[in-house]
Image: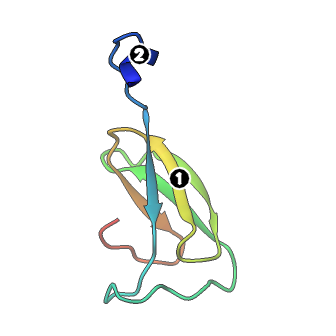
Amino acid sequence: KVSRYVKGLSWRYPWQSKSITLVDYTGENLLADFDEERAFKIVKEESGEVVTRGTITKADEIDVLLPELVKTRAVVDGLMLCGS
């Protein structure tokens, strides 16, 4: 039991995993690998403040830990993202 290790205290992990896969406009096909690295950033929805950033070469490489309960959206150089 978890309560045995935290001595009955309530505990939450303060991070959430966010994994993003980029697909074509139909939502059925994974985008092809990029010829060059593309920069991405995850920003807070309400303020636009950058939470994390990095680069990717494939459409399924965005996998990050973010603060829990923060609404975010993804931005990838050269791509228009819907529903991020």
Tell me the kind of residue under disc 2: Arg
**Mark 1 closeness class: few <14, some 14–19, many ≥20 residues within 10 Å:** some
Nearer-N-terminus badge (2/1):
2
Give 70 or 17, whichever is nearer the viewer.
17
**Mark 2 closeness class: few <14, some 14–19, many ≥20 residues within 10 Å:** few
Please tell me whether residue 65 is drawn above or below residue 68 in the rendered image.
Answer: below
Q: Secondary structure at mark 2?
A: helix
63 horizontally vs 84: left or right: right
Tell me the kind of residue under disc 1: Val
9 horizontally vs 51: left or right: left
Give 57 or 43, whichever is nearer the viewer.
57
Task: Please name the residue shown 52% across and 78% down the image.
Answer: 78
Task: Please name the residue shown 42% across and 89% down the image.
Answer: 29
Residue 47 image label: none
Task: Please name the residue shown 61% across and 85% down the image.
Answer: 33
Please tell me whether residue 25 is drawn above or below residue 83 in the rendered image.
Answer: below
Task: Please name the residue shown 46% across and 44% down the image.
Answer: 66
Q: Which corner quadrant of the image does residue 82 belong to?
A: bottom left
Mark count: 2
Colour style of the rendered protein structure: rainbow
The residue where tag 2 is placed is 4
Residue 64 image label: 1
Name the quadrant of the C terminus: bottom left
Q: Which mark is nearer the camera, 2 or 1?
A: 2
x%, y% of residue 64?
53, 52
Alpha-carbon span between mark 2 and mark 1: 30 Å
